[in-house]
Amino acid sequence: MKNSDSHRSSRQCAPNYYQILGVSRSATSSEIKDAFRLLAKKFHPDFNPQNRSFAEAKMKEINIAYETLKDSEKRREYDRNYPEKREATHSQNTRQWDWYSNNYSRGEATPKKPAKQGRGSDIRLNIKISLEAAFSGSRGKVTYERQRRCPSCRGIGKLFGRICSRCRGSGFIAEKLAKEIQIPPGVRDGHELRIPYGGHEGRTKNSFGMLYITIRILPHKCFSFLGNNLCQTVSAARSLLKSGTKICAPTIEGKTIRMFIPAGTRPGTIFRLRHLGWPAAFTGTRGDMLIKISETSTA
Ligand SMILES: [Zn+2]
């Protein structure tokens, strides 16, 4: 494994502290403080005995974010270094969910009672996104149909002793929904978003099931995964490999890296560029980019 200097020009991607605290970029210091207090309460390891290690990791993340954002000087510096990307303009009524909880706190009880109480059933959907969208996070709409309790007969199926004409006696009607979802940056294939109240409605009013959205990442033309490392193959002519040459390689951010490979580099040699891979969950520390050299058939 050889290293190159060219990665130095690329800035390491930091975790989004605003997103971690669930506040907007323009949040006041008291809003940040409130958000921190709520999260600190929610993820206090003592209150999460079943998910202690998750809660501890989460607390660490929340603390780091708060330490930076509560200090106006540090916050300014953070804003300067990591300006707002394609991050959604955060509207107050959009729920910002915590994507780690989807992965690690599956055992956590949902506040709703299970189906016995007439809760509607859950809905599962898949969405396909590009690797770039998974890396930087994205916002979009999913459209789907769900069952709602019939508003005329209130789910009974009958009105004044006769079959309800609106739902034809079933007690339910269909509703088309376009739900706005936010995919957090750095998700992996198979990542699941959990959206409370997104599922079907049961017989009781507002007794919605969950909506589960599984994210599938489309295959990429250049990159493949090896753990948190991104791999790609770059080819050069045999004569250039012999003499040493400059090669260009794309990054997941859409930049191009130019690096020099030394004379006599053999096909199959792998160069490692640090911190140009995929961000790890919790820490946000990025894996590496592995560039495998191959030889083009022309000499
Ligand atoms: Zn009805």
Image: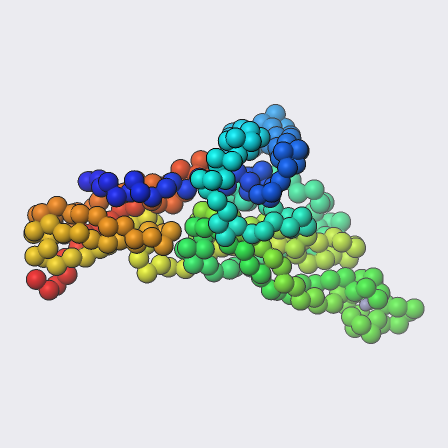
Location of the N terminus (image quadrant): top left
Which residue is the extreme one toward the top?
Answer: 46
Query: Which percent across, then down, holds residue 19?
Result: 55, 42
Residue nearest the viewer, comparing 195 with 279: 279
For the image, the number of numbered tags is: 0
Q: Is residue 53 above or below residue 161?
A: above
Q: Quadrant of residue 55?
A: top right
Query: Which percent across, then down, holds residue 188?
Result: 44, 49
Q: In screen coordinates, is 185 left or right of 194?
A: left
Location of the C terminus (image quadrant): bottom left
Asked whether residue 192 is in view, the answer is no
Q: Look at 58% across and 27% down and name the residue there.
A: 45
Q: Is residue 7 above or below residue 180?
A: above
Q: In screen coordinates, is 130 left or right of 295?
A: right
Quadrant of ligand 1: it is bottom right
Which residue is the extreme one toward the right?
Answer: 160
Q: Quadrant of residue 235?
A: bottom left
Q: Look at 56% across and 31% down and name the residue there.
A: 72
Query: Which percent across, then down, holds residue 264?
Result: 8, 48
Q: Look at 44% across and 40% down and name the residue there.
A: 81
Give the colouring mode of the picture.
rainbow
Query: Which percent across, then down, holds residue 70?
Result: 58, 30
Q: Look at 33% across and 52% down and name the residue there.
A: 255
Asked whether residue 238 is in view, the answer is yes
Q: In screen coordinates, is 182 left or right of 130?
A: right
Residue nearest the viewer, comparing 16 with 25: 25
Q: In screen coordinates, is 216 left or right of 92?
A: left
Q: Is residue 75 above or below residue 296?
A: above
